[in-house]
Structure formats: structure tokens, C-alpha cells
Amino acid sequence: MGEWALENHSRSVVTIQGVRLPADVRDMRMTKAWLVPIYRDSQGNYELVGAGFPWPPTSQWVPARTWDKRQAAVGAAIKPGETITLAFGVTRTSATKPGRSGGPVIVYSAGGSTFTVQKSPSMVLANKC
């Protein structure tokens, strides 16, 4: 599972057009990508859905409350001023080699223009756990 916080600092709605791993990905692939609201408690603390266990999130795990509100990343909108989690599944394509990839490549539109950004850091998916 990969997770990144996406922040819309513009005055326009941002619409996600695509999410993928970069062209130099090795021995892994992306499965599904979602936008998931960030859980915030009454004291302002927050938790992101993503790399934690159990998977998928269960009701005993606090961020599971926001997991039920996830939406497919492609076509989803991020409102001005909103911060949301991009979460996606990854799987190895080799039984013997670790998967390696740079951060996700996100294509989005806002204010009548289309943009492409690659998030960091890179990811390594171990071949043995």
C-alpha cells in the first residue's frame, strides 16, 4: 500500500485524471487507487489510511471510519483548501526480486489546465517479509 497526502492550495477544484507508477518501475505494479478522507479526532490529531495494519482497515482501527468514504482516485475532485489521502495497492510481479518504484505519477486538471506531478519518496516492496 502506498499513501500520499494531496493538498489543494488553489482556488479551483482539482480533478484527478490518472494515477500510475513511473515508467522505470521494476518488479511491481499498482492495483487500485483511491482518495480517502483524513481522520481527525476532537483534539485535532489525525491519522492517514495506508501502510498500517490490518489491511484492509477494520472497524477496530480508527482510520477505518474514513475508509468507508473512499472513492476511486480517477475522476475524483479535491476541493480548494482540502487535504486528502491518495492510497493505492501495489503488488510484486516477481517472486524472487523486490519491487522498486519512484513515487506515483498523478495527472490532474484545475482551472482549465492539465498538470502532471510525480510524488516522492521512492518505494521498495520486499520479496520476503
Image (cartoon, rainbow, N blue to C red):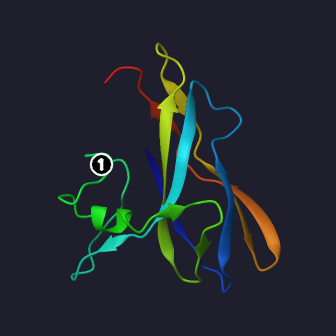
Q: Is residue 13 among what the camera can see?
A: yes
Question: According to the image, label 1 marks what residue?
Answer: 52
Residue drawn at (30%, 48%) of the image: 52
**x, y percentage for residue 54?**
25, 46
Mark 1 surroundings within 10 Å by alpha-carbon count, few (fewer than 14), some (14 through 19), many (20 or more): few
Q: Is residue 25 left or right of residue 81?
A: right
For the N terminus, give its image quadrant.
top left
**x, y percentage for residue 5?**
48, 63
The total of numbered circles placed on residues is 1
Displayed quadrant of residue 12: bottom right
Q: Is residue 106 among what the camera can see?
A: no
Asked if 27 appears above or below 13 in the picture, the reply is above
Residue drawn at (61%, 73%) of the image: 77
**x, y percentage for residue 16?**
66, 64
Q: Nearer the viewer, residue 46 or 69?
A: 69
For the C terminus, give its image quadrant.
top left
Displayed quadrant of residue 117: bottom right
